[in-house]
């Protein structure tokens, strides 16, 4: 997914692999930046991050455990962080597994 608006550029990719009946392994990469004005846009001035995680999906809940890290972190930033959540973080706008129909 690539998005460019008046003040931001964002690219995101994700993959998920089954690791059993209720378990999935996920990984992803993000690139992007936010600019004060559209004229400040520079395609080479982007931040990068990557992550991996596990999903436990049961009929009534989803548990997410992820670790994300910044390969090009700034001196005052942490290298990475763990994230834990119950439930889906964001709902997909378009699910390509159902022929492109919206959720």
Image: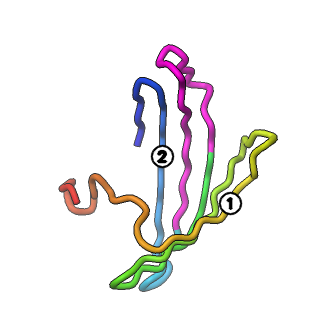
In depth, the one of 11 and 64 nearer the eye is: 64
| Camera-nearest residue between 13 and 88 | 88
Quarter containing the N terminus: top left
Residue assigned mark 1? 81
Q: Is residue 60 above or below residue 30?
A: below
**Disc 1 to disc 2, C-alpha distance:** 18 Å
Q: Is residue 9 left or right of residue 98?
A: right
Q: Are marks 1 and 2 in contact (CB under 8 Å)?
A: no
Considering every residue shown, the one lying at the far right of the view is 75
Q: Residues within 10 Å of mark 2 (few under 14, many from 20)?
A: some
Asked which secondary structure carries label 2, the reply is strand
Label 1, secondary structure: give it.
Answer: strand
Q: Which residue shows up at 48% across the image and 46% down it?
A: 12
Q: Residue at the location (42% across, 79% down)? A: 57
Q: Residue at x 62, y 47 (%)?
A: 49
Whichever of callouts 1 and 2 sits on the residue coming sooner in the sequence is 2
- Please state which of the two labelled residues, at mark 1 or mark 2, is closer to the viewer: 1
Q: Quadrant where the C terminus lies? A: bottom left
Q: Specify how the rendered protein is coloured.
A: rainbow
Which mark is drawn over residue 28? none
Does 52 sit above or below residue 39?
below
Q: Which residues are magenta?
A: 26-48
Residue 67, above or below 100: below
Specify the farthest residue to the top. Answer: 39
Q: Is residue 47 within the magenta segment?
A: yes
Left or right of residue 58: residue 81: right
Q: Is residue 92 left or right of residue 33?
A: left
Residue 44 magenta-highlighted: yes
Q: Is residue 96 left or right of residue 84?
A: left
Q: Residues within 10 Å of mark 1 (few under 14, many from 20)?
A: few
Residue 64 % position (x, y): 51, 72
* Residue assigned mark 2: 12
């Amino acid at each position: 997914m690539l998005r460019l608006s008046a003040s931001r550029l964002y690219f995101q990719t994700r993959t998920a692999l089954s690791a059993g009946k209720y378990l999935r392994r996920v990984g992803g990469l993000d690139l992007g930046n936010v600019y004060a004005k559209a004229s400040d846009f520079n395609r080479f001035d982007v931040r990068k991050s990557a992550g991996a995680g596990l999903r436990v999906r049961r009929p009534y809940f989803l548990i997410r455990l992820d670790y994300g890290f910044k390969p090009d972190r700034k001196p005052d930033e942490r290298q990475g962080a763990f994230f834990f959540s119950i439930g889906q973080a964001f709902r997909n706008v378009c699910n390509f597994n159902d022929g492109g129909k919206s959720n």
